[in-house]
Amino acid sequence: MSPLKIEIPVTDDDRLELTPELLAELNEQNTALESATPSEIIRWGVERFGDRLTMATAFGPEGMVILYLLSAISRNTHVFNLDTGYQFPETLELRDEVARRYGLEVEMKRPELTVEEYEKLHDGPLYKTNPDQCCLDRKVKVLRSGIVGKHAWMTAIRRDQSPDRAAAPIVGWDKKFQLVKINPLANWTKNQVWKLITDQQIPYNPLHDQGFTSIGCWPCTRAVGLGEDDRAGRWSGTAKTECGLHSRED
Ligand code: SF4
C-alpha cells in the first residue's frame, strides 16, 4: 500500500537546513544510537537540540513511556498533542495525569475550525467521506504549526507496528516536515513497552483494556479481535493506514 503523499508548504524561515554536514551527523548518530537505550536517545536529542526539540504525543502506550523517561531528563522540553476535536475523553484525561505525575505540560494544538464549524463547512463529517482530507486539516496542518521554530521532533513510533513504520530510523531527516525526526522506541517491541508500563506503573489509556490496541480519533478507531494486527482498528474497512504524519519516506 503506498503511503499518503501530502505536500506541506514550508513557511518557517527559522527552519533547519539539511546540509551535507548535518546529514552526515544524523547518519553517524543513527548508527551510534541503534543499540542505545530509549533514555540515551532522548538525552541525545535534548542535549543536541535544546529548546529546538519538540515531541508530539497522542498519549499512546509508547508516548506515555517516552514522557515517563523524558521527565527524568528534561521537564522543559516542549510536548504537544494534536487535538483534532475527535479524541476519546479517556485520551484527553491523560494530559492532566501527565502534568500531575511528571510535571510535563502538554500543549493542545487545535485546528483553526472547531468540529462543529468544520462539519458545517463540509456538510457533515469529512472522516466519513474523505478521511485523508480530514487528517490533513486536523492533524498534518496542525503539526506543521506545532513545529515552527523547532529543529527536531520526537515521536513514539515502533518499527514493528506496521509495514509503513518498519524502516523508521532512530534518528533521521523528516523530508515532509523538514526537520530532524527522533524515534527513541523505533527498535523496541510491544512487550518491552508494556513491561516498562507495568514495572513503573506508568499510566495508560484505559481503552487498551477494552481491546483498543492503537487509539486515534474515536470515529476512526475500533477495538481489534484476536489475531488482528495492532493497527487493524484504525480506519478499519478502508485502505487508509496512516494519518500522514509518519510515512516510509521519512
Ligand atoms: S483520524 Fe479520523 S477523525 Fe481524526 S483527523 Fe483523521 S479522519 Fe479525521
Image (spheres, rainbow, N blue to C red):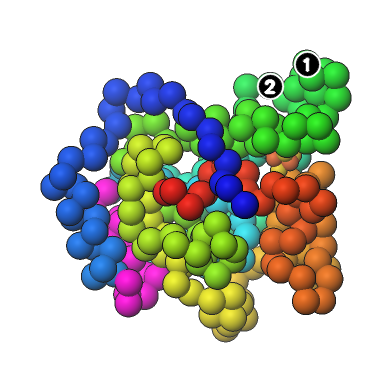
The residue at which mark 1 appears reads as 121
Q: Position of residue 154 (x, y in %)?
A: 42, 53
Q: Quadrant of ligand 1?
A: top right
Residue visible at 79% across and 19% down?
Answer: 122
Does residue 92 appear to the left or right of 22 in the view shown? right
Determine whether 97 is above or below 21 in the image. below
The residue at which mark 2 appears reads as 113
Q: Position of residue 207 (x, y in %)?
A: 78, 63
Looking at marks 1 and 2 on the same chain, the residue that comes earlier in the sequence is marked by 2
Which secondary structure lies at badge 2?
A: loop
- Asked if the magenta segment contains residue 43, the reply would be yes
- Asked if the magenta segment contains residue 56, the reply would be no
Q: Nearer the viewer, mark 1 or mark 2?
A: 1
| Amino acid at the residue labelled 1 | Leu
Does residue 44 appear to the left or right of 178 in the view shown? left
> Depth check: 144 or 19 in front?
19
Give residue 162's quadrant in the image. Answer: bottom right
Q: Main secondary structure of the magenta part?
A: helix
Q: CA distance from mark 1 to mark 2?
A: 9 Å
Q: Are marks 1 and 2 in contact (CB under 8 Å)?
A: yes
Please state the total of marks drawn on the protein image. 2
Does residue 149 show up? yes
Give residue 168's quadrant in the image. Answer: bottom left
| Amino acid at the residue labelled 2 | Leu
Which secondary structure lies at badge 1?
A: helix
Residue visible at 55% across and 51% down?
Answer: 57
Is disc 1 surrounded by few (<14), some (14 to 19) or many (20+) residues within 10 Å?
A: few
Mark 2 C-beta closer than 8 Å to ligand 1: no
